[in-house]
Image (spheres, rainbow, N blue to C red):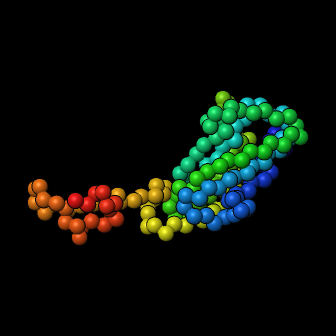
């Protein structure tokens, strides 16, 4: 007994084409293709990302992104592309796909994981997200009212140095 709709293809790519290795902050596109085997109504395509421990760290859907739901007739093919900024820390991540109907909480098909990607970063950050941190000001005052100790300033723009 075949599901009324199935995921037939998932591709992860960067600006140069299919890719599984990314730099933190790089743009990625996830192309998903569905194939309907029977009439299906009010569906949404869910994209979620799991970390190396298979914990969900990100979740969105076509419906929650404001594109409503969609319906397919038997033999229809549905294609969708998600664009993401991979603000992830260094590590292995698993983009995953779910075909879901919210109003009846019906799951039609799921690929978990749909792919495995590696994200690398030259900055040492921990956790799942990479927020591209920078120190823009740092100072040590030796006593009240004196100028900051210039030797203690690191990476401070000149306008912050007295």
Q: Is residue 140 above or below residue 107?
A: below
Relative horizontal placement of residue 145, taking residue 77 as reference (left or right): left
Residue at screen point 35% across, 58% down = 136
Front residue of 117 and 28: 28
Q: Is residue 3 above or below residue 42?
A: below
Relative horizontal placement of residue 91, taking residue 5 as reference (left or right): left
Q: How many badges with numbers are in the image? A: 0
Q: Where is the N terminus found, in terms of image quarters?
A: top right
Q: Where is the C terminus found, in terms of image quarters?
A: bottom left
Residue at screen point 69% across, 52% down = 30
Front residue of 115 and 15: 15
Q: Is residue 106 above or below residue 146?
A: above
Could you tell me residue 66's position as x and y percent?
A: 64, 33
Could you tell me residue 117's position as x and y percent?
A: 63, 63
Q: Quadrant of residue 104?
A: top right
Most extreme residue toward the right, as rendered?
75
Residue at screen point 23% across, 70% down = 151
- Residue 127 visible, this orientation: yes
Q: Quadrant of residue 79?
A: top right
- Residue 110 visible, this orientation: no
Could you tell me residue 62's position as x and y percent?
A: 67, 39
Residue at screen point 72% across, 35% down = 43
Q: Quadrant of residue 59?
A: top right
Most extreme residue toward the top, as rendered?
103
């Amino acid at each position: 007994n075949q599901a009324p709709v199935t995921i037939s293809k998932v591709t992860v790519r960067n600006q140069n084409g299919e890719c599984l290795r990314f730099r933190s902050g790089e743009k990625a596109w996830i192309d998903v293709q569905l194939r309907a085997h029977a009439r299906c109504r009010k569906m949404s395509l869910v994209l979620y990302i799991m970390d190396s421990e298979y914990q969900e760290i990100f979740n969105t859907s076509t419906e929650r992104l404001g594109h409503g739901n969609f319906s397919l007739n038997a033999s229809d093919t549905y294609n969708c592309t998600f664009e993401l900024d991979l603000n992830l820390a260094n590590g292995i991540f698993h983009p995953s796909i779910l075909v879901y109907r919210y109003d009846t909480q019906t799951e039609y098909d799921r690929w978990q994981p749909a792919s495995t990607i590696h994200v690398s970063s030259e900055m040492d950050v921990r956790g799942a997200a990479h927020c591209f941190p920078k120190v823009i000001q740092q100072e040590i005052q030796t006593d009240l009212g004196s100028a900051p100790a210039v030797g203690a300033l690191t990476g401070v723009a000149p306008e912050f140095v007295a």
